[in-house]
Amino acid sequence: MRIAVDAMGGDFAPDEIVRGAVLLASEIGFADEIILVGDQPKIEAALQKTAWSGAGISIRHAGEVIAMDEHPAQAIRKKRNSSVVVCGQMVKNREVDATISAGNTGAAMAVATLNIGRIPGIERPAIATILPTQLGNCLLLDAGANVDCSPVNLLQFALMGAVYAKHALGIPDPTIGLLNIGAEESKGNELTKETYALLKKSHLRFYGNVEGKDVYDHVTDVIVCDGFVGNVALKTSEGLAEMMLSIIKENMKQFDDHILAALTPVVKGLSKKIDYAERGGALLLGVDGVSIIAHGRSNSKAIVNAIRQGISSAKSGYVNIIKQELLELSLDFK
Amino acid sequence: MRIAVDAMGGDFAPDEIVRGAVLLASEIGFADEIILVGDQPKIEAALQKTAWSGAGISIRHAGEVIAMDEHPAQAIRKKRNSSVVVCGQMVKNREVDATISAGNTGAAMAVATLNIGRIPGIERPAIATILPTQLGNCLLLDAGANVDCSPVNLLQFALMGAVYAKHALGIPDPTIGLLNIGAEESKGNELTKETYALLKKSHLRFYGNVEGKDVYDHVTDVIVCDGFVGNVALKTSEGLAEMMLSIIKENMKQFDDHILAALTPVVKGLSKKIDYAERGGALLLGVDGVSIIAHGRSNSKAIVNAIRQGISSAKSGYVNIIKQELLELSLDFK
C-alpha cells in the first residue's frame, strides 16, 4: 500500500508527523510506502532529526500550506499546491491508496469531498469515529461533517458504517443502533422517527434505538446520528474523561512511592483506553477513496496509528464494497 | 416550606423515598414539612421501618400509582388520584411550595405542564440538570423535555437558566453558553445560528458558543441546547463515567490492603463528584411552581438531596423572578 501523509498539517507539523512516519516505516518493514507531502526542505530537515534509514519513505514537494484558521473551501481553491490538496489529488489519481492529514479539518474534508469526490449514490460523506467501549471498538457516525441530515443520509451512514465495521474493523455481522433519547420506536424527533422506519425496512442488521448511556456499553457495533448530535456527544465525553483523569492525577500527588508505583499503570491504562491517539483518526466515509483526518494535536504515536488505520482501511477494500452494497440497499426500497 | 414527595414513584419506592424523607426531616429540625403522598398503609409500613420520631412528616393518601411503563398523558388523565397527580395538584393549589417525584418521568412532566401549568409567556418548559465541572456546578437545559426547539424556546431557556443559577444556585452574574459544534458565530445548524442572533441581541450575559469539550471545563455557568442534544450529551457522559469507574474498580482488585486503603477515598470522591444522586434531581423550569424529577433509581440519599433542592429552589423565589425577567426580555426585542 502507498499512503500520502500531509507532513505540514497539525499543531506539531512537520516534526511529529515525520517522526510518526519514520517510526511506522521501520516497523512495517517497507512492505508499504509512506509519501510525505509538503515543503521538501522542511521535511528533509525533520527527517534528519530522526533515525531514518532511508527506506520506506519518499517525499512529494508541495510548496503551500493551509493554516488551521483559513476558510476551508476558499483555501483549497486558492492553494492548489498546498500539501492537503496534493494529498487528495494523489488519491484521486490512484497514485496512493489512502491519505492522512492532521491539519485544518474543514480543508481535509473539503478536499475529500471536492477533489477526491463522493462515491456515486452517496448524498453526504460522514465522519466516522472509533470509540472505546467496555467490549471493544464501536463506530459512531456522523461525528460532525453534516449539521443537518435527512433520514436517507442516516440510512446511508448505517450502510457505510456496517461495511467498514465488518471489513476494516473485523466485526463479523455488525449491529446498527440509531442514537436517540429513548429505546421505544416512537421516541425522538422527526429525523430519528423517519430514519427508524427506513432502517427497519432495510436489509441492514438494525438493532433499534440506542441511548447515550448505551454507547460505552457497546449495545451495538455501529451507531448513527446527525453530525451535530454526534459531535456534541463525542466532545462532551472527551471533556468528561479529561476531567476525571485530572481529578485522579491531582489526588495521586498525596501518595507515597509504593502506592504510586502500583497505581501508575492503572491510570496509564485508563488514559490509553480513552486516548484518541490510540485509535488513529476519523475516517471520511462516503468518499471515493480512503481519507483519514487525524487530530490537530496529533503526536508521532497518533500519526503511527492513523497511518496504520489508513493501510488497513485501504487493504479492506471497503470503498468498493460500499458501492456494491448501495445497489443492494436500493433493492430494499423498490 | 412544605414539600410534597411522591412516595410511590421510583424503583425503590416507597421504602427508599420514605427513608430519605425521614433522614432529612431529622436533619432540618422540622422548620420545613415533608408530605409523603401515596398509599397510606404502605407509607405507614415504610415509616415503621425507620427511626422516625413523628415530627416533620405527614401523609396525604393517594390510592393510585402510575407505573414506570404507562403512557404518561393517558395515565395522568385516567388516574386522577395517583400520587404524582395529587402532588401536582397540591402545588397548583399552593398547599405546598414544591414537589418531588422519582417515578415515571413522562408522567411527572405531564403533571407539571398540564396540572401545575406553564408560566404565562413561556412557550415550553425545559428540564434543567446540574452538572459537576472542574469549577463547581453548571446548569444545562434542555436535558430532554423538547426534542424539537425553536430559537425563541432556547432564548427563554437561557433566561430561565440564568435566573435559576443566580437565585437558587447562588452564582452572582451567570454566563450563558450555546452548545454548538464550534466556537465561531457562523457554526452550527439553523437552530443555533438563529438562537445565537437572539441571545446576542438580548440583555442576557451571553458568552457565545460552547463546544462539548467546554462543558466540564465550566466555560459558562449555564448551557442551553435543544432537548435531544442535551439528553444525548448527558447520557453519553453518564455512560463514559460509568465505564471509567468500572475499569478503575476492576483494576483495584489486584491491589493489597495498604494500597486499597489509600485509593478507596479517591475513587469514592470521584464517584461522588459524578454521581447524580449527589446533586438532587432535574428541575422543570418554566412551570408555574417548583417541580423536581429525581432519578428513577433514587436511593434515600438521592431523595434527601432532591428534597433539599426543592426547599432551596422554593425559597429562592425563582418562579416569580422568571415572570419579571420575561417582561424585561420582551423589551430587548421591541
Image: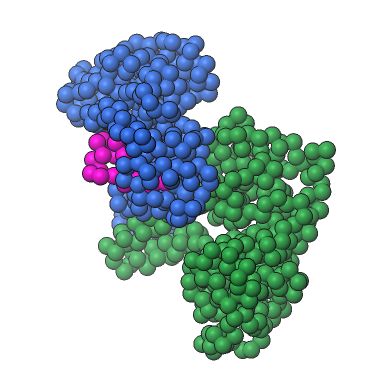
Chain colours: A green, B blue
Q: How many marks?
A: 0
Q: Which residues are magenta?
A: B159-178
Residue A85, above or below A211: below
Residue A75, above or below A54: above
What is the x, y in percent for residue A145? 59, 54
- Which part of the image, by quadrant, shows the N terminus of chain B? top left
Who's the residue at 44% across and 55% down the image?
Answer: B183
Quarter of the figure with residue A22: bottom right
Left or right position of B232 against B88: right
> Is residue A261 among the parts visible in the rendering?
yes
> Is residue A308 among the parts visible in the rendering?
no
Observer-nearest of A285 and B308 = A285
- Which part of the image, by quadrant, shows the C terminus of chain B? top left
What is the x, y in percent for residue A253? 29, 64
Who's the residue at 23% across and 31% down the image?
Answer: B316
Left or right position of B285 against A155: left
Who's the residue at 37% across and 39% down the image?
Answer: B158
What is the x, y in percent for residue B87? 35, 17
Residue B72, above or below B232: above
Residue most extreme to the front:
B334
Who's the residue at 62% across and 41% down the image?
Answer: A178
Left or right position of A122 against B313: right
Left or right position of B229 against B20: right
Q: Is B89 a magenta residue?
A: no
What is the x, y in percent for residue B72? 50, 21
Observer-nearest of A45 and B76 = A45
